[in-house]
Structure formats: C-alpha cells, structure tokens
Amino acid sequence: MFGGGVGVASSVAVAVLAGLMPWAVANAVITVASTALGTELHARFTFGTGRAGWRQHWQSAGSATAAYAVTSAAVFVLHLMRPSAATLYEQAVYLGAAGLAGIGRFLVLRLFVFADGRTRPATRAMDSAPARRAGAQVSLLSPVPAL
C-alpha cells in the first residue's frame, strides 16, 4: 500500500519536474525523495521496526539505484521507439517499470534491510520450540510475501 502510493505520487512529481529539467534529473530527484519516504513508511508501518536508521536508509539506497536504472532505461527505450511520445505514454511506461522495480525493492527490504527477526511473526508462530540462544536467527524456511 505504501509503496504503491509513493509510486503514484512519484509518477506525478516526475511529470511535473520533467517540465522544469531533463527527465533523468527529475527521475533522480524523485527517486531520492521517494526512497527516503518509502523506507521510513515501511520501517514504521509495514515492518513495525520504528524509525529507520541510517543503515536501513543506505541499504535501501542500493535498491533505489537499481530502481532508478530500471525506470530510466524503460523511459529511454520509449523515447528511442517513439521520440515524440505523449506524457500519457511516458507515465504508463514509468509506472509499469516503477511497479516492477517496487516489487523488487519490497523484497530487498523484507528479506535483507528489515530482516532482523521482528519482521517474521509467521516464522515465530510456527516454531513451538523455545529459542536456544539470543540474537538474530536466519531460517531457510522464512515465508516469502505473496504478490
């Protein structure tokens, strides 16, 4: 919910900023802002870890770099195929690429950035044996979120 909402807002913001600067620069500015906002929202609400720390923001920035590359490449290919593509086409391509990149980013956040044990309640509920040692545990049977 948060990722999709931030994605739609980002799409509008990129279109507005692209009227003032080159599209790639507008995409970079919006990617940085939406990554910071999205990471904070996911930390507080989706994964319930409280405020995101610098470590989580930096790790999230790595996935955002990949998302920037995907969205920029998609719009670049659109402009190669249709140099005078209307804003509506540009938005459709951007939202499609951002949606796919967002799914990947969510998985990175879920499996790596916020995977400290508190984000896996289903694993704990299935495990009836008491914990044998303190600290973070990694399970190969960790559930993957349904898409």
Image (cartoon, rainbow, N blue to C red):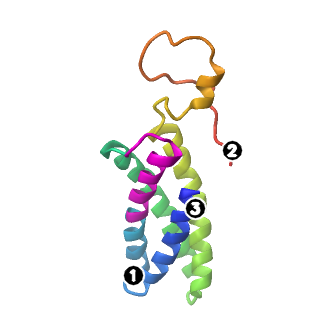
Does the rendering let one see residue 140? no
Given this view, does label 1 or label 2 mark the residue nearer the observer?
Answer: 2
Name which of mark 1 and mark 2 comes first in the sequence: 1
Looking at the rendered structure, the secondary structure element under dot 1 is loop
Disc 3 residue crowd, few under 14, some 14–19, many 20+, Cα 10 Å? some
Residue sitting nearer the eye, 26 or 8: 8
Residue bearing the label numbered 2: 146
Does the rendering let one see residue 120? yes
Total residue callouts:
3
Q: Give the quadrant of the N terminus.
A: bottom right
Residue bearing the label numbered 1: 22
Residue furthest toward the right? 146
Give the residue at x 58% y 30%: 121
Q: Is residue 29 left or right of residue 42?
A: left
CA gap, disc 1 and disc 2? 37 Å
Give the residue at x 68% y 44%: 146
Residue 83 disc label: none
Give the residue at x 63% y 24%: 125
Residue 117 versus residue 46 in the image, above or below: above
Task: Residue 134: give x, y in percent of width and height.
Answer: 42, 16
Name which of mark 1 and mark 3 comes first in the sequence: 3
Q: Is residue 68 left or right of residue 144?
A: left
Looking at the rendered structure, the secondary structure element under dot 3 is helix
**Region of the chain picked out in magenta, as a range:** 33-51
Residue bearing the label numbered 3: 4
**Which three-letter amino acid code belongs to the residue tagged 2?**
Ala
**Which three-letter amino acid code belongs to the residue tagged 3?**
Gly
Magenta-drawn stretch contains 45:
yes
Magenta-drawn stretch contains 85:
no
